[in-house]
Image (cartoon, rainbow, N blue to C red):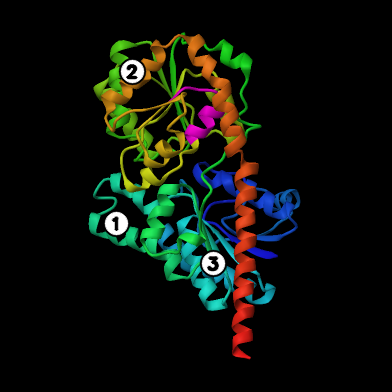
Amino acid sequence: MRLAFLTHEPFYPPSGGGSAEAVYLVRELVGRGHEVHIFGPPSVEPARVEQEFGVQLHPFTQWQMGRYTPWRNLKYLLYPSALCRLVEPVARIRTFDLLLSQHAISAVAAGRLGCRLKMPVVMNFLDHLSGFMETWPVWLMPPPVLAVLKRYELSVPRRFAAAGVLTVSDTLADLFAQAGYSRERLLPIYYGYDSRLFALDERAVKARTDQPPTIVMHGSLDHHHLLNIALGAVERVVAERPDAIFKFVGQRTGALEGFLRRVRRRVPSARLDCTGFVPYGDVANLLSTASVGIVPYEESTGTHCAFVAKTVEYLGLGLPVVSTPLDSGRRYFSNERLVRFSRFDGSDFGENILAWLREPLERRNGLAAAASARVRAELDWSVICAKAAAFVEDALARHQAQRGAVRLDAN
């Protein structure tokens, strides 16, 4: 099939968070013989990207888009209409078989275009975007505005009669079903990782010493990641282990800078290490020697729906994990011995970190191989994307069969 792939983030290189999935999904689609056209912000070295991935790029250049762009929220609101203006002229000439959107923002554009052009649409929701905003400061996201955004986001698949919807978690699939979208057209695919990049290194596992203990967090570092729970955890850990280092691997966002200021005021002796932005392919090297990986997300509808890449990648490396009790994670990892779930409480989160540090290294290391093998078998991108691509193909086949049935009835 000829497929239009719509995204609000640069395709390559991945910019963090959920953007990494696009690379692997497009590889799978092209590998199955499909023609893929990518509509989104410009990629670095576009000619090389087109040749390497076997795609055609259609860059959005009206304004800068990206995870760390200024005025991001306003641009997100304006982007669907602008993206429609980029895609529609091409779609009328190329005659795409299907529109595939990544994330909620592009889903709006895909839905509108699908209705105008009478084309099937598959929407891939890697999070419940507006649900994350529940933990944002009121001045950034007023509650009445947020309530409207959340209702609208969950209505998008039903509103635009999507041919199929992929979700990052069972929890998010439940919300779309509750909003009136057909359960039969929903498929949770979770969120994967590259097992080649985040491979278990037995030598690195054996070399972990806790001298000093290093507590690591990586990825996009936003408001819902770094508020009171993370602050309380640092305070609790430093009180017992003043030698511990808290290492943050990722862009120095405004949220991270604000968190660091709060830590320095409240726990001035805390040892903090911030790397700044690190390319996705280099992240594993900075995580592999750590003692514990953390997921201190604040509670919100968005975080409960998230299938956190951090957890998967920590486990791929055989790292012990402490996470707040996000519904999606607890449902999937309830029997995983290398993951511990705290309460939504900073002191309790910190106590769970300390509990891992009190465990003998030999016992922690003994759990690494089984945890890594499980995520490699179930959540490697090859597994996730094969499932997603098959679902897209089935959605198109179902749409074509229904259209053929309508024609027969009309005759």
Q: Are marks 3 and 2 in contact (CB under 8 Å)?
A: no
In the picture shown, does residue 26 fall above or below 261? below
On the image, the x and y values in percent for residue 307 come to 46, 42
Q: Is residue 72 visible?
A: no
Quadrant (top left/top right/bottom left/bottom right) for the N terminus:
bottom right
In this rendering, position of residue 409 left or right of residue 321: right
Q: How far is disc 3 from disc 1 in space, using C-alphas?
A: 27 Å
Q: Nearer the viewer, mark 3 or mark 2?
A: 3
Residue occupying image coordinates x 72% and y 54%: 30
In the picture shown, does residue 136 fall above or below 161? above
Q: How far is disc 1 from disc 2 in space, using C-alphas?
A: 35 Å
**Label 1 amino acid?**
Leu
In the rendered image, residue 38 lying in the magenta stretch gets the answer: no
- The residue where tag 1 is placed is 146
Residue occupying image coordinates x 72% and y 60%: 34
Q: How far is disc 3 from disc 2 in space, using C-alphas?
A: 51 Å
Helix, strand or loop status at disc 1: helix
Helix, strand or loop status at disc 2: loop
Q: Which residues are magenta?
A: 310-321
Q: Which is nearer the eye, 88 or 170? A: 170
- Figure quadrant of residue 114: bottom right
- The residue where tag 2 is placed is 270
Q: Earlier in the sequence, mark 1 or mark 2?
A: 1
Q: Earlier in the sequence, mark 3 or mark 1?
A: 1
In the rendered image, residue 316 lying in the magenta stretch gets the answer: yes
Q: Is residue 254 visible?
A: yes
Q: Which is nearer the eye, 248 or 161? A: 161
**Label 2 amino acid?**
Ala
- The residue where tag 3 is placed is 163
